[in-house]
Image (spheres, grey):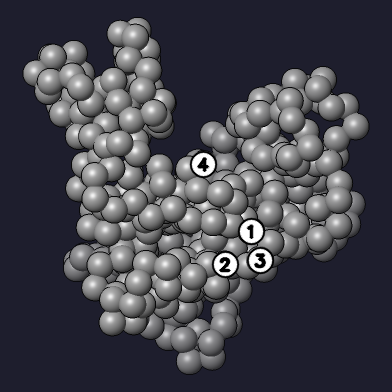
Amino acid sequence: MRVLCILLPDFPLKCEILRNPGIESSRVVIIHGVGSKKLVLDHSPELDRIQKDMTLQQALACHDRAGIVQADLPYYRSVFNGMLDNLEGISPLVEGADLGTAYLGADGLHLIYPDDESLVAAARGVIPEVFTARMGMAEGKFPAYLAALNSPPDGYRIISGRTGDFMKDFPCDVLPVSMKSKGKLREFGIRTLGQLAKYPVGPLQSQFGPEGRKIRELARGFDDTPLQARRAEEIIEENTTLSSVTISIDTVLVAIEQLLARVFVRISQQGMGIHSLILWTCSYDSEHWERAIRFKEPSTDIKRVMSRIRMVLENYPQPGPVEQAGVRITRLGYPRGKQNSLFTEVRGRDHLIEDIRQLELRQGNPQVFKLKEVEPWSRIPERRYALIPTGR
């Protein structure tokens, strides 16, 4: 398959410049949290001694006057997904591999784009000018990636015919294989793809197992890995800003429960449940925290969803006092059939909940609430209790 690879270097930094153009003239380091550590995600090109995944302390030791910017991963993903949406207007096969890396299927587009240069120009036209794009086209994802990696800034490189000669001088570290395999290649003294391509498949399989054949084929320029095209699914996102920053899990849970109530009002009419979601919070100093939650079966019970969310919040502490909270529903599904309870009291409660649910569907928002204790120790009466929808 003919593939167009698009690389967007310094993607987080360019996203910040897109939002705040004044950053372009400053020297900044974008950091994100991994556990208790603060690691470099991106940085201004002028800060030459700083590298990605370097700790914040090491970065400041190199450039102590650099500005610090907390990474806003939801914003970066939103910008990238917007680009992928635009690229789908060019090709129906679009894969967003990682932030700043996209692949397009180029086969069958000759009636729209008469040559490869026209396709490349169309792809560049839907990417905001603030982003520097490197593009490469070849047979297969890996050769296209190397072509993009070897192209000039805001330029492209098209590889046709034999790709082995083009790839032979690349280091083996560019291979999309495990770190263990890359380490073995270094131990054996195999530094370039050209050296690797000369080895027969037998010795490579004996040392690397099933991955040995793949390593040899990639080194010779053969990659039949199919594009993982984006699935057309509805993504629902709800978020809120808390009335005041808090470290109380109960306060955060109350806010999230209100957000989920809005989501269930929207999806209950279709008889669907939540299959997976991403829970995120943002601290008062813009530090982002998020966790993915998946359910074996699509859940239509808000209590079950909240139970999992409480468990996640208790097991993965927040990086600081929470100012914002949100949920992003990434996958919906239809639940399996459920047998009604044999007990009259339980059936009566279920019928009441269903009546409340139907009322909410007609009105479009929660109508029945219950009082829930949140911060009983607070001196401010409004913080002691909160109204929670009871329609689920």
Res. 129 mark: 3
Q: Residue at x 38, y 55 (%)?
A: 158
User: Which of disc 2 and disc 4 is earlier in sequence?
Assistant: 2
Instruction: Report x, y in % for residue 293.
Output: 44, 49
Q: Could one spot residue 317 in this view of the protein?
A: yes
- Horizontal and vertical percent position of residue 87: 45, 70
Contact, mark 1 vs mark 2 (Cβ under 8 Å):
yes
Q: Mark 4: which secondary structure?
A: helix
Q: Which mark is residue 127?
A: 2
Residues 55 and 390: in front is: 55
Q: Secondary structure at mark 1?
A: loop
State how far apart marks 4 and 2 are (Cα): 37 Å
Residue type, mark 3 in image = Glu
Q: Are marks 2 and 3 in contact (CB under 8 Å)?
A: yes
Vertical relation: 184 (above or below) 31: above
- Lower sequence index among marks 1 and 4: 1
The residue that disc 1 covers is 131
> Residue sitting at 54 percent across and 34 percent down?
315
Given residues 263 and 100, the one toward you in this image is 100
Label 4 crowding class (10 Å Cα cut-off): few <14, some 14-19, many 20+?
some
Q: Amino acid at mark 2?
A: Ile
Counting residues from the start of the chain, the first of labels 3 and 4 encountered is 3
Task: Indicate which disc residue 312 carries.
Answer: 4
User: What residue type is disc 1 on?
Assistant: Phe
Q: CA distance from mark 2 to mark 3?
A: 6 Å
Above or below residue 254? Residue 40 is: above
Q: Residues within 10 Å of mark 3 (few under 14, many from 20)?
A: few
In three-dimensional space, the C-alpha distance between marks 1 and 2, rounded to whole angstroms, equals: 7 Å
Callout 3–callout 4 Cβ contact below 8 Å: no
Secondary structure at badge 3 equals loop
